Amino acid sequence: MAELILGQVLAFAGDPFAEGPGAARHERRGAVLVEGGKIAAVGSADALRAAHPGATVTDMGDALLSAGFVDAHAHYPQTAIIASWGKRLIDWLNSYTFPEEMRFSDSSYAETAAETYFDLTISNGTTTTVSYCTIHPESVDAYFGAARKRGLRALGGKTCMDRDTAPEGLRDTAQSAYDQSRALLERWHGVDRLSYVITPRFSPTSTPEQLSALGALWAEHPECLMQTHLSEQIDEIAWVKSLYPQARDYLDTYEAHGLLGAGGLYGHAIHLEPREIDRLAEVGASLIHCPTSNTFIGSGLFDMGGLTRRGLKVGLATDTGGGSSFSMLRTMAAAYEVGQLRGRPLHPSELWWLATQGSARALGLEGKIGNLAKGMEADLVATDLASTPAIAQRAARAGDLWEALFPTIMMGDDRAVSAVWAGGRRAK
Ligand code: GUN
Ligand code: ZN
């Protein structure tokens, strides 16, 4: 049965970083036709109603219909410790993160956490997540199991750590990381809307042997993405230098072990050396910007202007629970503020594109998700542009779409998300 969803439609015909806001397509009285989990047509409400008289009509009024949000870097096991006070990266990991991740050896704990996590992401309009799990294979099964039940597109993998810098009880080995990652990849990759991502946590918690083993696994499975962390904090970079004295820089610890490539997702990537930027650009890797985390943990200011000018693909992400919100609206607001502090104010079209098509492109999924167009998977969010009195009174003064949207970007949260569809199924 076809469903015709009516509202203001926002889609992209190009990249606003390259083409400006004109890359967006806005239909004031628009419609999206959904059939069999895919988008069958996008157009004006009148034309699509006339062409599809048998479709069920869901009228979202003035709400803005767009692709669902794509959160390109998160740690679902950190859901319960989000907003933990007062530490910087290494102490934050030791004090809050690692003790919580230990609990995921219990599969029922992991399953409950995954359900809570997806309740929150869907409520915030996020229809695709890319998550680190824990070292426990059970945590990966819990994540993919919960996503599959809800018909979500989800990517993720077992977080590998074998060095004594990680606590006892939260370590695997080079061999077990390889074996367990491979078994999970074979179990989950390509099942329904799920993709396995090879996941060394970061160089400080892996031995060179483990990085090599995961590099070998990636070479055997180039269809998979690989995710890790890169140059998030200055102390972390010094730590990497002491653990890998041979390496030219942080990126080289990955490059030397087969973990640099076009399918690589490098989270944070704030304090990059010129050589690292050159290599990341040469191989066509993706950088994942985590602005609420970078301010919350005090990591630094991502150089969106410089890195996009170099042609690097950039995705946007919450980095739950180092990030302080599950909301991609709050994340767009933080990206705007960080941009301001670096002298590059991001236009609302750029912010919305980053949270949808930009993140999808960073994952190599731009042909499937992140936009409203015929043939795309039907992941949609309907956003109320007057969800609170403060937002409503500002939006009432708006002269165009961008002025109407920007107050919701800067002040909105899950209250602005009035409906969500995942794979054509109503999820909120
Ligand atoms: N670096 C290594 N692990 C993590 C993590 O869990 N969160 C953040 N923000 N950075 C990391
Ligand atoms: Zn992270």
Image (tube, rainbow, N blue to C red):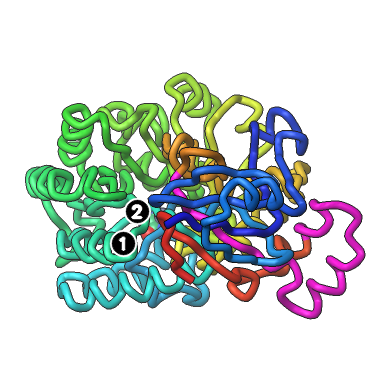
| Residue 296 sits in quarter | bottom right
Going by the image, does 159 lie left or right of 305? left
Please name whichever residue, 108 or 236, is drawn nearer the observer in this view of the structure. Answer: 108
Q: Quadrant of ligand 1?
A: bottom left
The residue labelled by disc 1 is 147
Q: Amino acid at mark 2?
A: Ala
Whether residue 405 is in magenta: the answer is yes
Q: In the drawing, what numbered circle is on residue 154?
A: 2
Q: Is residue 171 left or right of residue 225?
A: left
**Could you tell me which residue is drawn at 22 percent across and 78 percent down?**
109
Mark 2–mark 1 contact, CB under 8 Å? yes
Please indicate, yes or no, whether residue 297 appears anywhere in the rendered image. Answer: no
Q: Residues within 10 Å of mark 1 (few under 14, many from 20)?
A: many
Q: Amino acid at mark 1?
A: Ala
Give yes or no for residue 423 being in the magenta stretch: no
Which contiguous range is marked in magenta? Answer: 377-406
Q: CA distance from mark 2 to mark 1?
A: 6 Å
Q: Is 356 on the left or on the right of 255, as rendered?
A: right
Q: Which circle marks residue 39 in the picture?
A: none
Label located before the other in sequence (2 or 1): 1
Query: Is residue 272 visible to the viewer in this orientation of the structure?
Result: yes
